[in-house]
Image (cartoon, rainbow, N blue to C red):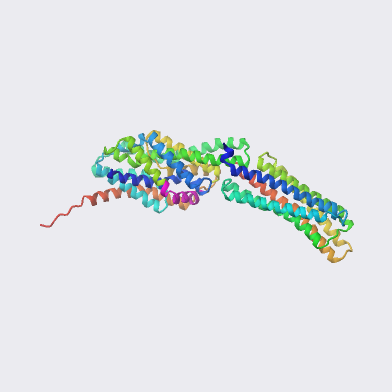
């Protein structure tokens, strides 16, 4: 059980950081109460992990071979990387942290699945692009019907609020299904636990992070990153859910933060306005670049420290 | 099921309609006070009663407005709509306050309207009241999303311009006459205040139009 603590820590970090991507806009704009969002997100993350988490776990465990020690090092290094980014309130890609740490393990043991890594990297680039395309298409279609419905102010508000809750729940399901692999796949690779147990433990630890520490990041994402009207915010969360779910089916863990940025950029393209604060975007891009590099360095450094031996002078 | 889930929204909706009904009552009392007493018979016994009624309805609109704001602070409606509704009520509230202020000015300053001004002031009050009626229709159109908001804005705008013209004519007539200079100042202020009703109605009407445009995606 002890080796899993690193993974549980990782899941906690992931939940604390990434719940903001699905419920940040709704909570920070006070459309949905924090605790309503946190409880719904937690429940759907666990459901997503258990029902649809297997393909991602299979992909990540196939990137390299792991001993139990390497699995723990990889998991802890990724978790520390994500936690540092969370403390600085930067929406960070856990997938990049995990893959960065797996690369570190691959460098150390000299075994690496380049084809698998290529697929993962391609999907990283594809995530914001797909989310942008989905948000543009969804916006066009739903706006057409929304305007035709002739809803009064009260009906429209009720639908918007319900929509945010449903889209958030779907986004949380996709988050759990896609990102649970980041939490416990290395332990499956090391033969420590079964895929089902990995999904369950991963899901519960993500939910724990959402319930205990997601509030500050939700406020950052909602208030500093995007200034969207309720309809656009709904479209962004829906496009996040759909694009992340698509990559879940492909079996590749991707970044929900990148999906949000893609969705928001798509809205910006439709409306012809800057929907993203450029300074914040720069910080996020720096975070994305730094995350795999830092995680990889942490793995190498931790491995080096663990294997230091005292050699007496003769 | 939705009625149960969105109980607060439903409460706000009902209170908004109650607010508009009370606004209408306040408008009727004001109109009665001006038309039945001030312009036709200065010694009208009902004048004090109409003032009290106008004041009572004005108080009630403020109370309802506060109640709506309190419910909205309790998380009814999404923040965007909440802000719009609060601004709208705040702006509409200025009109019943104007009704009350005008009547109290007449009462406390013992203002009497010279006969030669009566037809023009009647016309000014009549068109100002039309502006208020159109405003209520426009607010209902916003709450029910039945359309026609822009057309109603156009009508209110036309009426407001008409009121401005009448106001200028009355002011000129006041200063062309040989009545007491002190009375001239009193009447000029009275006419300006009555003219403010249509100005405020137009301002609220523009706000309603913007809120309506904002809600399209």
Queried whether the magenta region covers residue A219, the answer comes back as yes
Q: Residue at x 46, y 52 (%)?
A: A280
Is A100 situated left or right of B102 in this image?
left
Q: Vertical placement of A123 versus B198: above or below? A: above
| Rendering coords of residue B161 (x, y %) | 77, 51
- Residue A110, compared with residue A302, is above or below; it is above
Q: Position of residue A247 (x, y in %)?
A: 40, 36
**Whether residue B196 can be seen here:** no
Relative to residue A307, is residue A177 drawn left or right? right
- Identify the image quadrant of residue B6: top right
**Which residues make up the magenta segment?**
A211-226
Label total for image: 0
Q: Residue at x 59, y 42 (%)?
A: B7
Residue at the extreme left of the image, as rendered: A314
Instruction: State the image coordinates of residue B167 (x, y, percent, origin top left).
Output: 80, 55
Q: Quadrant of residue A38?
A: top left
Residue A48, can we see it?
Answer: yes
Asked if the stretch drawn in magenta spans residue A73, the answer is no
- The rendered magenta stretch, by its main secondary structure, is classed as helix
- Judging depth in this view, the residue of B215 and B190 nearest the camera is B190
Residue A153: x percent and y percent?
A: 62, 42
Tell me: A195 left or right of B10. left
Give the quadrant of the N terminus of chain A.
top left
Quarter that holds the C terminus of chain A: bottom left
């Amino acid at each position: 059980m002890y080796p899993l603590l690193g993974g549980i820590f990782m899941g906690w970090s992931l939940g604390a950081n990434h719940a903001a991507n699905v419920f940040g806009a709704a909570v920070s704009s006070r459309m949905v109460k924090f605790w309503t969002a946190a409880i719904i997100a937690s429940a759907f993350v666990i459901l997503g992990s258990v029902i649809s988490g297997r393909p991602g776990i299979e992909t990540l465990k196939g990137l390299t071979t792991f001993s139990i020690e390497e699995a723990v090092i990889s998991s802890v290094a990724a978790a520390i990387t994500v936690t540092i980014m969370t403390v600085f309130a930067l929406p960070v890609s856990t997938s990049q942290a995990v893959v960065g740490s797996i690369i570190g393990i691959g460098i150390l043991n000299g075994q690496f699945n380049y084809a698998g890594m290529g697929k993962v990297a391609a999907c990283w680039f594809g995530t914001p692009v797909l989310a942008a395309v989905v948000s543009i298409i969804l916006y066009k279609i739903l706006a057409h019907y929304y305007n035709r419905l002739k809803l009064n102010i009260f009906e429209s508000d009720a639908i918007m609020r319900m929509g945010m809750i449903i889209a958030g729940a779907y986004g949380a399901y996709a988050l759990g299904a896609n990102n649970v692999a980041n939490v416990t796949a290395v332990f499956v690779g090391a033969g420590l636990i079964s895929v089902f147990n990995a999904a369950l433990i991963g899901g519960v630890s993500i939910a724990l992070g959402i319930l205990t520490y997601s509030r500050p990041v939700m406020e950052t994402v909602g208030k500093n990153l995007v200034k969207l009207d309720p309809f656009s915010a709904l479209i962004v969360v829906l496009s996040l859910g759909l694009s992340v779910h698509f990559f879940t089916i492909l079996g590749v863990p991707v970044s929900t933060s990148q999906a949000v940025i893609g969705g928001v950029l798509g809205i910006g393209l439709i409306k012809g306005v800057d929907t993203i604060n450029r300074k914040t975007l720069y910080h996020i891009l720096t975070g994305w670049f730094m995350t795999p590099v830092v995680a990889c360095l942490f793995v190498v450094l931790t491995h080096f420290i663990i294997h230091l031996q005292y050699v007496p002078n003769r | 099921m939705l009625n149960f889930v969105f109980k607060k929204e439903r409460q706000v909706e009902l209170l908004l309609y109650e607010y508009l009904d009370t606004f209408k009552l306040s408008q009727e009392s004001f109109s009665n006070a001006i038309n039945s007493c001030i312009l036709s018979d200065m010694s009208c016994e009902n004048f004090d009663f109409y003032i009290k009624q106008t004041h009572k309805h004005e108080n009630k609109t403020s109370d309802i407005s506060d109640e709506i704001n309190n419910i909205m602070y309790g998380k009814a409606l999404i923040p965007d709509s909440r802000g719009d509704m609060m601004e709208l009520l705040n702006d509409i509230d200025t009109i019943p306050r104007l009704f009350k202020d005008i009547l109290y000015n007449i009462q406390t300053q013992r203002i009497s309207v010279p006969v030669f001004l009566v037809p023009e002031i009647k016309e000014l009050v009549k068109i100002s009241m039309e502006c208020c009626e159109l405003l209520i229709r426009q607010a209902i159109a916003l709450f029910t999303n039945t359309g026609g908001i822009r057309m109603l804005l156009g009508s209110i705008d036309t009426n407001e311009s008409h009121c401005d013209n009448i106001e200028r004519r009355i002011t000129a007539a006041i200063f062309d006459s040989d009545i007491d200079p002190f009375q001239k100042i009193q009447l000029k202020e009275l006419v300006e205040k009555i003219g403010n009703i249509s100005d405020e109605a137009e301002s609220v009407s523009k706000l309603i139009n913007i809120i309506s445009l904002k809600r399209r995606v």
